[in-house]
Image (tube, rainbow, N blue to C red):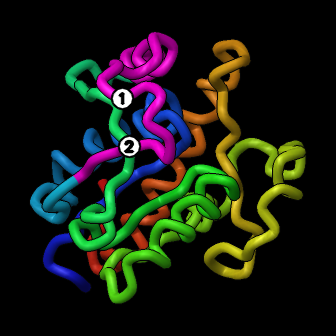
Amino acid sequence: MPDQIAVLFCCMGNICRSTMAEGVFQAMTKKAPYQGRVSQIDSCGTIGYHTGDEPDDRTMATLEAHGITDYHHRARKITAADFDRFDYIFAMDRQNLNDLEQLRRKKPGSKARVMLFGEYAGSSSSSNSSSSNSSSSGSTGRGGRVAEPISDPYYGGRDGFAKAYEQVTRFSKNFLQDVFPDIKPE
């Protein structure tokens, strides 16, 4: 079990999914039993279109509806240095993963493990089979299950943000339990 880990969440523009994942993960790890176990948490995008922007209002409203009111972030694009600064870089969907893998090939020997965050999908309380996006993933997650992508809610309604919140919360819990198996969640 590692003493501390550094985690980076990555989507396309860094204003919806990755920021939601960062906000949820920060909230989970700033209190017991995971307090002090994560040295760095950040999020970024594979493109720089929104660099400097705050998260989407719907992301912030979703976080706030779940009691996460102290999250602040400005969008940024991934850098080559991120592959050495972070232990884990989580892509939100297959395209993000492909983009990250392409960048990582330019940085051989980097320490980051790059993977779909949905590899930590586990058992969903909502119906996984209803996700029509599972065919876009195709990779196998933890326990042999298909990795579950997080669909980009940007062009949709609030229900897409609610779904993304449910996913990042579930994935975060499963990831923390996997990395720190001796810690019992409260």
**Which residue is found at the position 52% from the left and 62% from the top?**
100
Q: Any magenta on residue 36?
A: no
Q: Magenta residues?
A: 41-65
What's under tag 2, amino acid-wise?
A: Lys
Q: Residue furthest front?
A: 106
Q: Position of residue 173 (x, y in %)?
A: 44, 56
Number of the label disc, if any, that sits on residue 51: 1
Which numbered disc flags the more N-terminal residue, 2 or 1? Answer: 1
**Which residue is found at the position 66% from the left and 34% from the top?**
152
**In the rendered view, would you say 175 is above or below 180?**
above
Report whether residue 20 is seen: no
Q: Position of residue 135 (x, y in %)?
A: 88, 58
**In the rendered view, would you say 1 is above or below 168?**
below
Q: Which residue is mark 2?
A: 77
**Which residue is found at the position 19% from the left and 61% from the top?**
38
Could you say whether the residue bearing mark 1 is in a helix, strand or loop?
Answer: loop
Report whether residue 42 is seen: yes
